Image: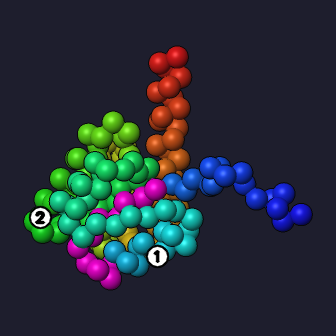
Amino acid sequence: MLSSLRKPPGKELELARVLVVDDDVASRLTLQTVLEAGGYCVDSAASAAEAVGKLDERQYELVLSDLQMESPEAGLKVLAHARLMDYKPATAILTKYQTQTPDTRRPVFIEPQDLPGLLSKVADLISQRAARIVNRQLRQA
């Protein structure tokens, strides 16, 4: 009976891929662990340069980046590069500071210390990206 439940070769479950970019090792590993426990496939980068390389090598559904790393604008550079990718990942800024709910034209801020909120926002961002892709495909058809 167990063999009938196995997926055929090549039909493994595809998890949403998330890139976490943060120069703080503890924050990066904590986020990676929480997101993996939440069912996501997570890659991480410790710098903007490393993140840009990963964005060029593989596709991500979501890019979460700390704002200030090796320079004050490093996180914005990562998100700008992500938005230029053909596959258009969702993007969000990681912040340790309380923020107001932004409108849709402004960057999305995620507070990593709010774990239930973090997982909820990640799921929302990935589903919104999927809806945009479907809408774009329907308009092109």
Q: Is residue 24 magenta?
A: yes
- Residue 70 visible in image: yes
Between disc 2 and disc 1, the foreground one is: 1
- Label 2: which secondary element: loop
Q: Nearer the viewer, residue 4 or 41?
A: 4
Q: What residue is shown with label 1?
A: 33
Type of the residue with mark 2: Pro
The residue sitting at 36% across, 40% down in the picture is 88
**Residue located farthest toward the front when viewing the structure as drawn:** 9
Q: Is residue 129 magenta?
A: no
**Residue located farthest toward the top when viewing the structure as drawn:** 141
Q: Nearer the viewer, residue 101 or 113?
A: 113
Q: Quadrant where the N terminus lies?
A: bottom right
Give coordinates of residue 18: x percent, y percent: 42, 58
Give the residues in magenta: 17-27
Indicate which disc, 2 or 1, sits on the residue closer to the N terminus.
Answer: 1
The residue sitting at 41% across, 73% down in the picture is 31
